[in-house]
Image (cartoon, rainbow, N blue to C red):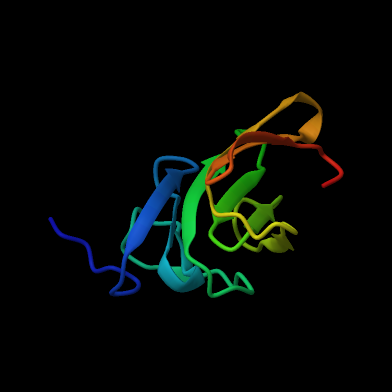
Amino acid sequence: MTLEPPYFGSWFDATALDADTVILVGLRGHMFRSDDGGSRWTRIPTGTTATLTSIQHTGSGRIIVTGLDGVLLESRDGGRSVSLQSLPDRSGNSGALPLSGGGLLLIGEFGVRRLPADG
């Protein structure tokens, strides 16, 4: 069965929070959440039009989204809302992994680097 997409554009990553809850990220800052396995979608305002390249669910309710132009989004409420942080070097990042202590390991155009919990 083919599902109706919430937006007819390019998608770059997705994560499942549970059997029914899915979050998609993609082109032009688009981020959508489905709580019913993809039947209906809710747009999550991101505050950016930069391409979102990856989403990582840490398992503790924290969700990290990376993007181009130094975009880093974080959610602490299961992806219902996000806060936008713009990295000063405006680097494009293609992934992030959580580190102990709350920091992140960022993967992207400048290689691999650590981002401390305080930014």
Q: Is residue 49 above or below residue 3?
A: below
Q: Nearer the viewer, residue 11 or 19?
A: 11
Residue 102: image quadrant is top right
Q: Position of residue 71 (x, y in %)?
A: 62, 60
Q: Nearer the viewer, residue 19 or 108?
A: 108
User: Total of numbered circles in the picture?
Assistant: 0
Please identify the residue farthest to the left as the structure is shown.
1
Q: Position of residue 75 (x, y in %)?
A: 67, 53
Residue at left offset 54%, top offset 57% = 67
Residue at left offset 75%, top offset 59% = 88
Asked if residue 78 lies left or right of residue 115, the reply is: left
Quarter containing the N terminus: bottom left
Asked if residue 24 lies left or right of residue 114, the reply is: left
Residue at left offset 53%, top offset 44% = 108
Q: Position of residue 74 (x, y in %)?
A: 68, 53
Q: Nearer the viewer, residue 3 or 36?
A: 3
Asked if residue 58 lies left or right of residue 83, the reply is: left
Q: Is residue 118 above or below residue 39?
A: above
Please identify the residue farthest to the right as the structure is shown.
118
Residue at left offset 45%, top offset 50% = 21
Residue 60: image quadrant is top right
